[in-house]
Image (cartoon, helix red, strand yellow):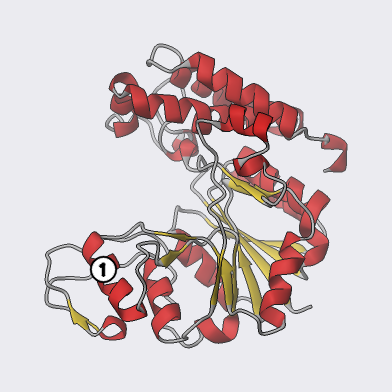
Amino acid sequence: MNRLAILPCGGDPFCVLTPLYYYKTVWGKEVDKLIVVVNSPVEKECIDFIRGLVAKVPNAEMMYFPMRIQQGNAIRAAFDASKEEYLLFTEDDSFIYRPGYVDKYFKELESGLYDVVGDLREFAHPRLIEMTMKACDTNSKNVNLHPCFFFGKRSDFLKTDLNFSSREFKEGEYIAPLDWTVDIPYTGNDQFVWMSIQLRTLAKVRIHELPIYMTSIDDQSHAWGRMGIFDKNCPLVHFGSSACIEDILTDSRGIPLARRKEWTEAPPEHPYWNIIRNDKIFVDMVASVKLAWIKWQMTSFWPALWPLRDWRDEYKTGFERLTQGNNVNHSIMDSCYDTYCREFPVDLGAL
């Protein structure tokens, strides 16, 4: 089939287990190979556990970097280590839970119908978006592709500089694909924005735009109405909580779990804590999406982490510390958590 899936991971065993479980049980036969790129300073026992998980999954291999790197750099590492023409990028804060969709969208590329399949977003400075819209002759601000459930071709990427990461342009710098000399001091952008610009302007890709399949504060009612991520045509769940062991999930000393054997004292308090204490709207969203999904992953795969029971217990304690006494709306969190448990049951025997 000449198809490769690339999964960058931040070293949280729970966040690796989830997409691996669905790869093995749902869509793994729709690709030739999966490369899992683990990049994290988390302790050796966690890395060894993840390595063992990947080894048990058919047609999967693991790359490892002992530090946190940009998602785009992780993609580039797997890109350079492979040769398949047709590529799927996914993330460890998402999982593909319906069969057939990976095959369907790869076939759109293989048949020549499209060059890219994926959803679009902003995630860049408004001025950079404006100039991209002008260069691409579009009225939509969602001009940047998302490297999650993204389908593309190696031959198109080879027309670019292969920079899959974020890139900041300085005032006075000329951006040739946009025929624009930067006229503002700062043009910050997220992962894959620069690559999106190049794919559009240099490779001239034809894009099949998908809806954005993100979790929502309304997921409980969406489940009742079979909308959003529960819609019959939705192939994946994207919940956005994969980096928590690098910041808000800590041990009793306040050290992020990814660094608990590396650091001896806590870093300055993470900005999330102040938000959780004071911003009720943000808290409600965090409670329903990030925290409910963290809890779902933790409880669904809890028995599988028996070999890491010390780390697992620290994880649970860190989660409880995060959710207690910080203005978290437990009613929303718990109702969403119950919804996810009901809609996405896990059979650990299939691992």
For residue 86, side relative to residue 264 (left or right): right
84 above or below 194? below
The C terminus: image quadrant: top right
- Dividing the picture into quarters, in which one does residue 64 lie? bottom right
**Image location (x, y in percent) of residue 220:** 60, 27
Name the amino acid, label 1: Glu
Mark 1: which secondary structure? Answer: helix
> Circle 1 sits on which residue?
130
The residue shown at (50%, 23%) is 318
Q: Residue furthest right?
A: 349
For residue 89, side relative to residue 190 (left or right): right
Q: Is residue 45 visible?
A: no
Q: How many marks?
A: 1
Viewer-proximal residue among 223 and 36? 223
Viewer-proximal residue among 57 and 254? 57
Q: Residue furthest top?
A: 325
The residue shown at (43%, 24%) is 284
- Dividing the picture into quarters, in which one does residue 7 lie? bottom right
The residue shown at (50%, 15%) is 330
Viewer-proximal residue among 6 and 234? 234
The N terminus: image quadrant: bottom right
111 above or below 290? below
**Image location (x, y in percent) of residue 109:** 66, 78
Q: Is residue 155 visible?
A: yes
The residue shown at (80%, 52%) is 26
For residue 50, side relative to residue 345 (left or right): left
**Image location (x, y in percent) of residue 32:** 78, 71
**Image location (x, y in percent) of residue 2:** 74, 79
Circle 1 Cα neighbour tier, 10 Å, few/some/many (<14 / 14–19 / ≥20):
some
42 above or below 293? below
